[in-house]
Image (cartoon, coloured by chain):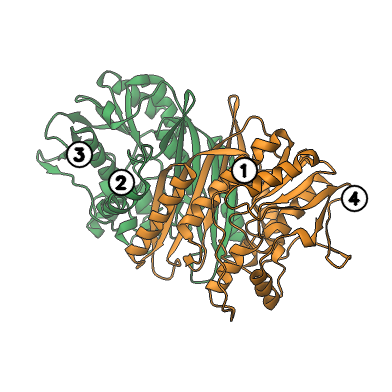
Chain colours: A green, B orange
Amino acid sequence: MSHGAGGKATHKLIESLLLPALDNPALAPLSDAAILPHGDARLALTTDSYVVRPLVFPGGSIGELAVNGTVNDLAVSGATPIGLSAALIVEEGLDTEILAREVGAMGRAAERAGVPVATGDTKVVERGKGDGLYVITTGIGIVDPGLNLSSSSVRPGDRILCSGTLGDHGAAILIARGDLELEAEVPSDTRPLTPLVDALKGVAGPGLRFMRDPTRGGAGTVLNELARDSGYSVALWEERIPIRDVVNGACEILGMDPLYVANEGKLLAVVDPGRADAALEALRAVEGGGEASIIGEVREEPARMVLMHTQFGGTRMIDMLVGDPLPRIC
Amino acid sequence: MSHGAGGKATHKLIESLLLPALDNPALAPLSDAAILPHGDARLALTTDSYVVRPLVFPGGSIGELAVNGTVNDLAVSGATPIGLSAALIVEEGLDTEILAREVGAMGRAAERAGVPVATGDTKVVERGKGDGLYVITTGIGIVDPGLNLSSSSVRPGDRILCSGTLGDHGAAILIARGDLELEAEVPSDTRPLTPLVDALKGVAGPGLRFMRDPTRGGAGTVLNELARDSGYSVALWEERIPIRDVVNGACEILGMDPLYVANEGKLLAVVDPGRADAALEALRAVEGGGEASIIGEVREEPARMVLMHTQFGGTRMIDMLVGDPLPRIC
């Protein structure tokens, strides 16, 4: 199970098996979306399977999640979405009302994000060969020609911004499954990131160096990838990382670090230090960005490592996650 | 099960549930690929889930099928593929050798078709929540600006060409499953249609009116859609329709009409009558087109119907398929 959950085991599987067989220049960077040159333009292409359990959870459902997730992978790649495809794998016996509800949720999410679901496919598998409904969305977008988002654009001194509280989606799913004896309810943060990305582009322009949405594997995984790929160090300030008390509580019960818990409506951005305060203000002015924070900075040393400066004055290393305690979170 | 198999039940599901919820101009034509305008260019987008059982069958396997199928949906839309995405839903416990083999098959098929697998996603689901491996491929292509392929481009007198024997893929799967007591083996016809499409474009140019690859639901379904959408009649000549004896035999045992059996390496094309013979010759000169045939023509009447002129001088109506006796064929 750990192979599909987004941590070190997924990386090993991808790197040992998939990359050599499918080797090509577009695939190599392993970012959220592949960039395909087309004439003077750059097209972004991204795909994700959604196998979340349960299908409906506080704050959202599989259909909404599948559209937002793919829109967000395009948005953090600096691309404006122009079309989505949706494939449904339906388990025999699924109530058609559930199917209708999720297709409706997809339609509303696509309308909110301003992008058409342009094509689709439906397959039905026998009882016991699926789990109700799996949704696979793919998106195409056009990359903003003024942006060059990449871990290789990042420089020491750059600030790391987070658009809001971390771990909400993962905690929402966990609590919705009833695995925890918690009275509290956490809503998933699923939402389109397009307005937040537009706000950042507007104030930071080319000072916007790198963006990712910390979904499976959470912020810890994204920041480790950034440190590894840029060759620099990522320093985090624990007291500035926004995490809800109930999410912290749920993670403590499970012995998990909320930094590795999935988000579905948050972005991490690396911004030129001269534009960081303006970028923070811009994020906070947009719906879904009210709790944005500057959570860290890029440093020269120690190379390729993520270090957390704790509230008590210590430091601890944030390593790449091995496995993942939360399968089927998205 | 019949809802996912490509016949009338699929149509009803799509039309009653999916179209109203996802309504937009790109989705409406329900062809193999959606066309998205981008500047002066037209982008084609297509997606398909592959849930074929067994994973390996004579002549191919799920990985090869998934790449060829998406390449073919672009090719028959008149588009040159520029990038594919691949999502894998893996059931816990799947042998990694099988996964490696299928990823290898995808890589080779993509190389053969000259298109990169540019991005991907892997999810693992628990035992009993999948069936080994599901593969979902999506493709983008650039539509040839000289083509206007559409059921509304079709005119009475146009000839209907078929690139080879019908029903091979469906029969191959059926026999591979051991559902039939047949000694014979039929190889699936899975292959990229790009060379056949290029040959047709070369000789027919704008005289090429319409193309489709008759996958789920077979040639019978494609020709019914053509008759319905064009408002004309489709006349078929039974003795000119190429079908292998063993496929005819398998279909007879099952009480099925091979016209409704899936193909994965065949195309149907509607061509201006003045270019039909040249188009036939061009198809026959390409690998995979040796048994191409002019199987029928478009007529004014009876509107929106497909009529088969049998070898014995009679006629019978070829209706839209209700349900499909072959689920999980692709």
Amino acid type, mark 1: Val
- Which quarter shows the N terminus of chain B? bottom right
Give the residue pinned by disc 1.
B197
Task: Kindly identify the residue that appears in the image at 14 percent across and 28 percent down.
Answer: A300
Q: Can you tell which mark lies on residue A238?
A: 3
Choose between A108 and B236: the one closer to the eye. B236
Task: Kindly identify the residue that appears in the image at 49 percent across and 67 percent down.
Answer: B57
Comparing marks 4 and 2, which lies closer to the viewer? 4
Compared to residue B58, the image places residue B230 above or below, namely: above
Q: Can you tell which mark lies on residue B301?
A: 4
Compared to residue B247, the image places residue B207 above or below, namely: above
Choose between A290 and B270: the one closer to the eye. B270
Chain designation of label 4: B
Choose between A137 and A252: the one closer to the eye. A137
Chain designation of label 3: A
Report crowding for label 2: few under 14, some 14 to 19, many 20 or more residues within 10 A (C-alpha). many
Q: Position of residue B118 (x, y in %)?
A: 42, 41
3 and 4 marks on the same chain: no
